[in-house]
Amino acid sequence: MASSVGCQHYVRSCLLKAPCCGKLYVCRLCHDAEENHQMDRFKVQEVRCSECQTLQKAQKNCQQCHVQFGEYYCDICHLFDKDKKQYHCQPCGICRIGPREKYFHCQKCNLCLAQDLRGNHKCVENVSRQNCPVCMEDIHTSRIGAHVLPCGHLLHKTCFDDMVRTGAYRCPLCMHSAWNMDEHWELMDKEITQSPMPAEYQGATVKIICNDCQSHCTVPFHVLGMKCAECGSYNTAQDGGLVQQQQEPQPQPQQPSDLHAENEPESQDQPQSQAPH
C-alpha cells in the first residue's frame, strides 16, 4: 500500500493521516477503497514522512529529513504528486491537471474546459455536478478527463471511448448525436436509395421526432431509417403508426362477353302480316 513512491494514484513520499478515522493512507482514494466512509481531503492536517516516519503538519518538505513529499503540493487540497503542470482552480474548488494556460473556467458550466471550447460549446449549468450517465460515477472530482458532447452534457473520456466502440452514437441523457454524423447520414442516403421498400409500403409515411433538431415532421417510411425533413438527420424516433397512401380504385376491365353484347344490333319487333278476310 504505502511506499516511498506513493501508490497507483499518486507519486509522493508521505502518508496522509485521515481526519475521519486517524488511519494512515497514501491518498484519499486508497482510504476510500478500504474504508466504509470517505476522506475529506480539505480537512487533512497531518502527514507522515515515508523516509523518516516523522508525523508532522501537512507541508511540501519533511521538517525532519527535508525530503520532498511531492514535486507539486497544494495546501488547499493537500495534494502531493509529481509535476503534471497542475493548478488549483478556485471556482472548481479542486486541483486540475494543466497547464493552466490551456484551460479556462466556464462560469455557467462551472467547470474548467480546454481553450478550444471557449465560445464553442453549449453551456449546461453546473453540468459537471452530475454523475457520468454511463458509469454513474462522479465527474467533477474524477481523475479521469471529461468529454464534452455537442449537446453540452459530459461523459468520462473513457466512457465515451467505450460508447463509440460499441456503436452507440447518442447522448445517454438527451439522445442528441454525440458527434458530427453527416458522413454517416450520406451513407444511409445511398443505402436507402439502393434498397426500395416492397410495393405494399410504397408511398407509406410516418410521423417522427428528430433527436437532433427537435422537429416534428411526416416523412417516407423505410425500415433502415427515417430522415428528418428539417436537418437531414437519421437520429429520429417514430411518433405514431404508418399512414398508407390511399390507392384510387382502378376501372375493371370489361369481359369479352360484355363487349360482344354491346356490338350486337338490337333486335326489332317485325310487324306481323295479317291474313285477308
Image: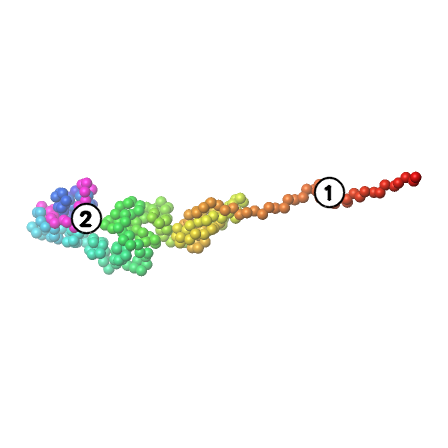
Badge number at residue 261: 1
Q: Nearer the viewer, residue 195 or 41?
A: 41
Viewer-nearest residue: 188 or 246: 246
* Badge 2: residue crowd in 10 Å (few <14, some 14–19, many ≥20): some
Name the residue type under label 2: Tyr
Is residue 31 within the magenta segment? no
Residue on which disc 2 sits: 10
What's drawn in magenta, residue-wise? 33-53
Residue at image x 24%, y 49%?
142
Amino acid type, residue under disc 1 in the picture: Ala
Closer mark to the observer between disc 2 and disc 1: 1
Residue 191 in sight in this render? no
Residue 137 visible in the shown view: yes
**Marks 2 and 1 close (CB-CB < 8 Å):** no
| Distance from Cα at disc 2 to Cα at disc 1 | 102 Å
Q: Earlier in the sequence, mark 2 or mark 1?
A: 2
Question: Is 56 situated left or right of 139 in this image?
Answer: left
> Is 200 or 56 nearer to us in this picture?
200
Residue 258 spot, x, y in % from top left: 70, 42
Work out which residue is located at the far front of the displayed protein and give it: 277
At label 1, counting other C-alpha atoms closer than 10 Å, the crowd grade (few under 14, some 14-19, many 20 or more) is few
Q: Which x, y percent locates residue 226?
A: 45, 49
Find numbered disc 1 in the image and state the secondary structure of the residue it sits on: helix
